[in-house]
Amino acid sequence: MKEKDKQFLKFHSKLYSLENLKKAIKDYEEIAEFRLIKGKDYNKVEIKISGDYQDENIGDEFKNYALFLNIRSL
Amino acid sequence: MKSNKIINNNINLENNGIIFSLNTKIYPQEIIYKTCYTFIDRMYVYLDSLKKNKITVSLKGKEKLTKKQLESLKDEFLNELLNILIREAVSRKNQKFLEYIIGGAITASLEKPEMKKENKKEGMDKVEKEIESLKKELEKIECSEDYRKDPLNIKKIFRNHERKR
């Protein structure tokens, strides 16, 4: 697997709730492979792009979606 | 080379984005969220908090943007932020009035039909009573003073008048 196909994203736990991150991962699980690493200040998400869906913006799209879920749950 | 790409501290042309910080004491987290919502369909928005009471906003264009465009995006974001902040403050201020007006409207819409029915019934009762009393008065007049008896002697007066003619 190329390094380019792997992305690490970090989400501040005060801005992105763990619950919404889990939901975002669940909704995106068909597109890529996700791994959630829980932390105190930050929760990290590892994305492995695989299969037919090759989009370099997947990380940004995922960040947007995670933010959207947090806004919606206000 | 890297310093050329990063034109400003907060603009990264290579990354096609702009980063800036907001004070949460001035702009509460909820207001920042709501502002992000208005931008989320046009660009990639990411939030971070590197210091206490500070939120770092990262705006990244979905298409290639120039430095000027990125700067105007930031300005637009700040304007929208202020707009939402003021709107929230005004709506919070007017909330009591709105609750009072809406509450009054709902109460009025619930009570009116019943009141109308009552009023209508009361009105009808009054009219019926008046009709009854008028009927009774008329009956009294008809019974006590029969026009055929001619108590005021109108017939006689009329006849005399005709004779004189």
Image: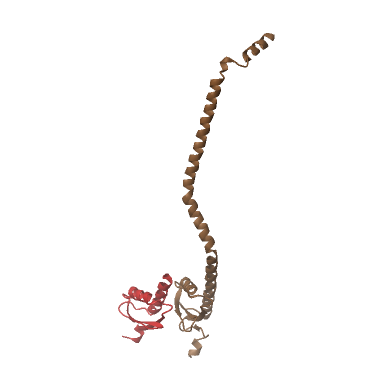
Left or right, B9 with respect to A36, comes to: right
Left or right, B153 with respect to B142, comes to: right
Q: Residue at x 40, y 74 (%)?
A: A65
Tell me if residue B149 can be seen: yes
Nearest to the observer: residue B31 or residue B78: B31
- Report the chain shown in brown: B
Query: Residue at the right extreme?
Result: B164
Query: Residue at the bottom extreme?
Result: B1
* Percent coordinates x, y for residue A61 in the rendering: 40, 76
Nearest to the observer: residue B160 or residue B98: B160
Q: Residue at x 46, y 71 (%)?
A: B37
* Percent coordinates x, y for residue B19 in the rendering: 49, 81
Nearest to the observer: residue A68 or residue A41: A41
Residue B139 against residue A33 in the figure, above or below? above
* Percent coordinates x, y for residue B82 in the rendering: 54, 72
Residue B126 against residue B111 in the figure, above or below? above
Quadrant containing the C terminus of chain B is top right
* Percent coordinates x, y for residue A26 in the rendering: 33, 74
Tell me if residue B62 can be seen: no
Residue B124 against residue B76 in the figure, above or below? above
Display colour scheme: by chain
Query: What is the drawing colour of chain A?
Result: red
Q: Residue at x 49, y 41 (%)?
A: B120
Left or right, A34 with respect to B164, comes to: left
